[in-house]
Image (tube, helix red, strand yellow):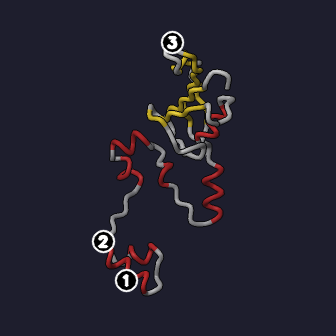
Amino acid sequence: LGGTVERLVAEGCPRPALLFGQCAVRRLDEAALLADPVLAALDPDLDSLVNANEPADYAAARARPAPEVTIVVRRGRADPAGGRSPGPDRAAAVARAATVARAATAAGLALGPRVAVALNGEQSHGGGQVPLAAGDVVAFTVADGA
């Protein structure tokens, strides 16, 4: 495959569609994709596979509703060792948010150095533009005084 790609690029044909014509390609319809239990569980609407080749496709994708995510906000408090530990959770809320920044806005927070973010239980370092998928849990831990 790598040699075919290199040859097509050298011939001035960098379009993926030209590659498909020279390789064995298996096209999967929606039913075949959703037969994969992991994909069906994580992306039942196949949002991750939206095709956006034209400006109108991109506009239609942008017009789709953002995924529903769960947002949890924790407040930090001082512990006896002088560090910080998370305080009690504020009631979790479900909101529509396509990115971590939008989830923060929905929670009434501004992202910054005093706000730590965890996505599905893992600390997130990607910033506000990290995309979210339906069912994600975004937890914000806010340091006291922020």
Q: Please state, as top left, top right, bottom left or bottom right, where the C terminus lies in the image.
A: top right
Q: Please state, as top left, top right, bottom left or bottom right, where the N terminus lies in the image.
A: bottom left
Q: Which residue is mark 3?
A: 80
Q: Report how far apart the C-alphas of labels 2 and 1 lie in the structure.
A: 17 Å
Asked if marks 2 and 3 touch (Cβ < 8 Å), the reply is no
Asked if marks 2 and 1 touch (Cβ < 8 Å), the reply is no
Q: Nearer the viewer, mark 2 or mark 3?
A: 3
> In the image, which disc is placed on residue 24?
2
Q: Secondary structure at mark 1?
A: helix
Rendered residue at 53%/29% (across/down): 139
Q: Nearer the viewer, mark 2 or mark 1?
A: 1
- Residue 88 horizontal/vertical position (percent): 54, 15
How crowded pointer 1 is (Cα within 10 Å; few <14, some 14-19, many 20+) is rated as few
Q: Earlier in the sequence, mark 3 or mark 1?
A: 1
Q: Report how far apart the C-alphas of labels 2 and 3 lie in the structure.
A: 63 Å
Asked if marks 3 and 1 touch (Cβ < 8 Å), the reply is no
Q: Earlier in the sequence, mark 2 or mark 1?
A: 1
Q: Report how far apart the C-alphas of labels 3 and 1 lie in the structure.
A: 65 Å
Rendered residue at 51%/38% (across/down): 134
Amino acid type at mark 2 = Ala
